[in-house]
Image (spheres, grey):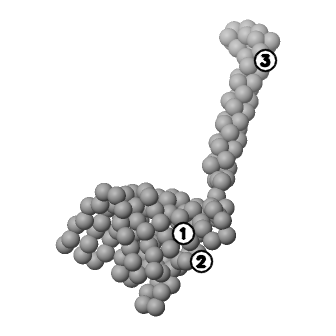
């Protein structure tokens, strides 16, 4: 006689129901994890920045210095705090730092965070800088390390 004819039908239905419920629970838990990841990613995207990816230019008679950053916050009508990957670029040099106070009215910039100045034959690492006179003058502050090529 065949072995499958002796198996209890209730036992087969019970085992089948347990397997189906376990698959449903696994799928449901995966869906909850995906929703949780989406919520975490959307919270990371939101920030306290007034400006996302601000871009400015310091204009003078001989050149333009382009200023970019990842975030910016207004301190008052004229001053903006630029944060994360702040870069000053012109045809002659570039400066990279993390935090800068940029004055739009006077076209000046001031930083007290680690900064890296690069030009064709010079590299300066400093604890901060001050750009004034519409970009014609740059003063480096704190411990500075200069490499001349």
Disc on the earlier residue, 2 or 3 = 3
Residue 97, image x, y percentages: 43, 61
Residue 130 seen by the camera: yes
Label 3: few (<14), some (14–19) or many (≥20) C-alpha neighbours in 10 Å: few
What residue is disc 3 on? Answer: 13
Residue 65, image x, y percentages: 46, 79
Q: Nearer the viewer, residue 17 or 42?
A: 42
Task: For the residues labelled 2 and 3, say whether their Cβ atoms are less than 8 Å apart.
Answer: no
Image position of 89 (left or right of 147): right
What residue is disc 1 on? Answer: 102
CA distance for labels 2 and 3: 78 Å
Disc on the earlier residue, 1 or 3 = 3
Q: Give the residue drawn at x 48%, y 81%.
A: 134
User: Could you tell me which secondary element the residue under label 2 belongs to?
Assistant: loop
- Quadrant for residue 135, please give it: bottom left
Task: For the residues labelled 1 and 3, say whether their Cβ atoms are less than 8 Å apart.
Answer: no
Residue 37, image x, y percentages: 64, 42
Q: Give the residue drawn at x 49%, y 77%.
A: 66
The numbered dot on residue 91 is none
Q: Quadrant of the C terminus?
A: bottom left
- Give the number of the mark in front: 1 or 3: 1
What residue is disc 2 on? Answer: 105
User: Could you tell me which secondary element the residue under label 3 belongs to?
Assistant: helix
Q: Give the residue drawn at x 67%, y 47%.
A: 43
CA distance for labels 1 and 3: 72 Å
CA distance for labels 1 and 2: 9 Å
Q: Quadrant of the N terminus?
A: top right
């Amino acid at each position: 006689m065949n072995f499958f004819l002796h198996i209890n039908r209730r036992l087969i239905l019970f085992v089948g129901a347990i397997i189906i419920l376990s698959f449903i629970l696994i799928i449901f838990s995966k869906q909850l994890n995906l929703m949780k990841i989406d919520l975490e990613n959307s919270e990371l995207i939101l920030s306290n920045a007034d400006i996302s990816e601000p871009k400015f230019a310091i204009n003078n008679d001989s050149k333009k210095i382009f200023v970019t950053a990842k975030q910016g916050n207004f301190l008052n009508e004229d001053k903006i705090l630029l944060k994360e990957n702040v870069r000053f670029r012109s045809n002659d040099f570039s400066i990279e730092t993390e935090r800068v106070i940029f004055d739009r009215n006077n076209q000046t910039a001031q930083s007290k965070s680690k900064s890296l100045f690069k030009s064709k034959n010079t590299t300066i690492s400093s604890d901060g800088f001050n750009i004034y006179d519409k970009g014609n003058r740059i003063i480096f502050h704190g411990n500075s390390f200069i490499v001349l090529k």
